[in-house]
Image: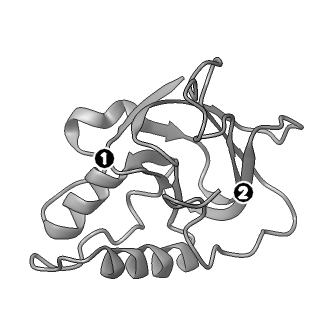
Amino acid sequence: MYRVVDDGGFLAILDPNAYTSFISETFSSYEVLRRHFLEEMQKGTILVWGTGVANKWRIDVRFEQSDVVGFRQVTGPLNVSDGFLCLSDYGTLFGAALNKAASLPPGNKRSLYIQLASGRYTCRVVQMFDPEDDDCSDGDHDFLIELYSQESSPEPWLEIPWRFGEA
């Protein structure tokens, strides 16, 4: 089980060796960062999704497809270039976009690595709860991430799913 503290309402899974994190030391708008995420998602280096609320999330990662049903789900393509991926939050990604020397994940978050063989994967993200519910975090885990190979990859995401204010 992975635990990610999210103060900004977004989570991500990414290939830290392929994802280009730095934008500029002076960019200041969410829109610039959103466009950067979309460009990187087209390359298959990151998947970013909204959580609906800020929280400390419990994330279960599995390496096979299942029939688990949650409140909502989304599937996208993700590449692994060097044998691992990592989980991240909006604040960490924002900081890395401002600092050319930043590493993903930062040294204090190495526990967010996910080891798996290099290649192209389908990534299914299942949000287990309705973020509008007061008890949004009452199960074993809040998000399920499934990483698996299949013959045809899903289309890249054209937008960040489940942003704040979206159901």
* Element carrying mark 2: strand
Report if residue 38 is visible in the image: yes
- Is the residue 52 above or below the residue 101 in the image? above
Q: Residue at x 59, y 41 (%)?
A: 132
Image-based side of 156 in relation to 101, left or right: right
| Residues packed near mark 2 inside 10 Å, few (<14), some (14 to 19) or many (20 plus) | some
Say which residue label 2 marks. 74
- Residue 114, percent from left and from top: 51, 39
- Is the residue 78 above or below the residue 61 in the image? below
Q: Considering depth in this image, is 149 or 112 the residue closer to the camera?
A: 112
Residue 105's disc number: 1
- Is the residue 71 above or below the residue 155 in the image? above
| Residues packed near mark 1 inside 10 Å, few (<14), some (14 to 19) or many (20 plus) | many
- Residue 14, percent from left and from top: 47, 56
Q: Residue at x 40, y 75 (%)?
A: 34
Separation (CA) of disc 1 from disc 2: 23 Å
- Residue 44, percent from left and from top: 57, 70
- Quadrant location of the N terminus in the rendered image: top right
Amino acid type of the residue tagged 1 in the rendering: Pro
Q: Considering depth in this image, is 64 or 33 the residue closer to the camera?
A: 33
Q: Residue at x 43, y 73 (%)?
A: 37
Q: Work out whether mark 1 precedes mark 2 in sequence or the reverse, and give the earlier one.
A: 2
- Residue 63, percent from left and from top: 72, 38
Image-based side of 18 in relation to 158, left or right: left
Look at discs 1 and 2 and give the one toward the viewer: 2
Quarter location, residue 87: top left
Report if residue 100 is visible in the image: no
Amino acid type of the residue tagged 2 in the rendering: Val
* Element carrying mark 1: loop
Q: Residue at x 77, y 38 (%)?
A: 70
